[in-house]
Image (cartoon, rainbow, N blue to C red):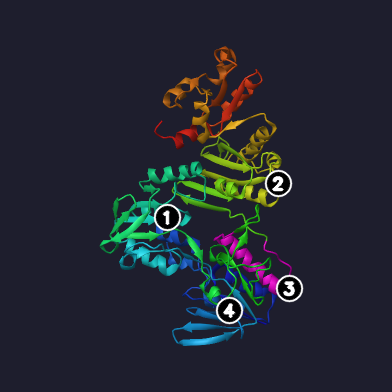
Amino acid sequence: MKYLIIGGVAGGMSAATRLRRLDEQAEIIILEKGPYVSFANCGLPYYLAGEISERSDLLVKTAAQLTKRFKLDIRQNSEVTAINRTDQSVTVKTAQGTYQEHYDRLILSTGAQPVVPAIEGLDSAQHVYTLRNVPDVDQILAQAKASQKAVVIGAGFIGLEIAEALVNRGLQVTIVERGTHVLPSFDIEMAMFVQRALVQHGVTVLTENAVTAFEAAGQTLVLANGQTLASDLTILAVGVQPATQLANAAGLQLGLRKGLIVNDHYQTSDPLIYAIGDAIIVKQTTTNQDTLISLASPANRQGRQVADVLAGKNRLNRGSLGTAIVRVFEMAGGSTGLNESQLQAAGLTYQVLHLSGKSHAGYFPGAETIWLKLLFQPQTGELFGAQAVGPDGVDKRIDVLATAIKAGLTVDDLPELELSYAPPFGSAKDIINLAGYAAQNLMAGDSQSVQWHELAAAMAAGAQLVDVREPAEHQQGAIPGAINIPLDDLRQRMSELPKSNHYIVSCASGLRSYLAERILKQNGYQVQNLDGAYALYALMQPKD
């Protein structure tokens, strides 16, 4: 059997090496357009920042190493320009000329390519780059060393990693983002923690704006609001799209955003051609709807699975949650599953829960605050998604929740999770356990919440906000219209609160206000708890 694999890196090389482990006699040829068949794509921003000091460390395995160990025929700088389905061959272009290569089975691992928006003057602009491979980072690094001001267009994961890297290189950095906030895949209030970290490190963040033109050979950027920016170095990081031009030209069936349609066994519309990685459409685990997920972990998994399928094993593409994490200076932001806008688009009923906890025991030095947002079905407790931000421990919590969603656990299972605990590593009641308890309280009706964006309307309708923090906390900053009754005084001062009113209670993070809610409810009051409390409100309403 002769296998051709178009594209290396995560998916292609995983498929090739797994195929060899399963079939020592197979002929396996990898055709890679670029000069490197196996490199750390996700490590590029950290090399740009100088955290990865040696360029060679980006090259996971050389072609010679892979050939020797796995008996692979690796052909770098070999661009496939056409797939000839009728005679089961591909056309390959190299520096030496063009030739045809036959296949019995073909695997497409063409990945994704950066979106390059149509901006006036871009064609003649200099020092404007995208970051997708090693040659890209070489060019950016060379220009960064000769630059003072940089603009990053787009504030997704890659855009933020590049912004941090350029700040670490000593550049003045501005981020321009068309959406309402950085990290568009996050809900706005969780992304604001990361946005605040960017600003604190001197990054200028311009949201709800866009670059409309390049002038002066790219040294001046014109924004939609008429503002201009000076730039010595501009990075386009507005997203990626499936690299499926080759597949499209061959007549293979495409779907969402021109992604390749594959079945559960990674077969395209041509049964002899398979596809994996960023170029394919997958199913979102919860909704089973089509989605595109450009991440290394799913690509690696798919590469192994398609090799198993070709070797006769029954492996299925079971979809993906899109679990991801980004570091922005001292802050990390992680997410898994669906966010609010995705839940709304899917027409799913959901409940929101915000809470904070410590990365490990609060009394042990170095404990950091984690903010967690949990999204779940309010009747069944099905877990839909989660987002977390904080300086430490975010990865652990998001990984636990991603596993819980994949395993079909509900919020009732979260308190039962036995997570490792010792003071330097965790808490006896981890924030994951606490999230389960809080969600159970909401489902049982023991607690009722109001979201930060619902507060103004609720107060306009007559609800009275009661701040149960200590007077000194209240004086340092409070929500307008709140009256201050400290939690420990609440039982003695309940007579100040007419039972005919509707009350919303708030504290710093939500714990004390929950206790106040329980006290008041059991004394006949109509009361709700401000989810996320003053900390979240202050983040979203900094002028109040």
- Nearest to N terminus: mark 3 or mark 4: 4
The residue to which callout 3 is attached is 312
**Residue 314 within the magenta-colored segment of the rendering:** yes
Q: Quote the CA–CA distance across marks 3 and 4.
A: 26 Å
Q: Earlier in the sequence, mark 4 or mark 2?
A: 4
Q: Residues within 10 Å of mark 2 (few under 14, many from 20)?
A: some
Q: Amino acid at mark 3?
A: Gly
Residue labelled with disc 1: 154
Sequence order check, earlier mark of 3 and 1: 1
Quarter the N terminus occupies: bottom right
Whole-percent x and y of residue 533? 52, 31
- Element carrying mark 4: helix
* Residue occupied by mark 2: 409
Q: Which mark is residue 68?
A: 4
Between 220 and 404, the one lying in front of the other is 220
Q: Residue at x 63, y 21 (%)?
A: 519
Circles 4 and 2 in contact, beta carbons < 8 Å: no
371 horizontally vs 104: left or right:
left
Quarter that holds the C terminus: top left
Q: Amino acid at mark 2?
A: Leu
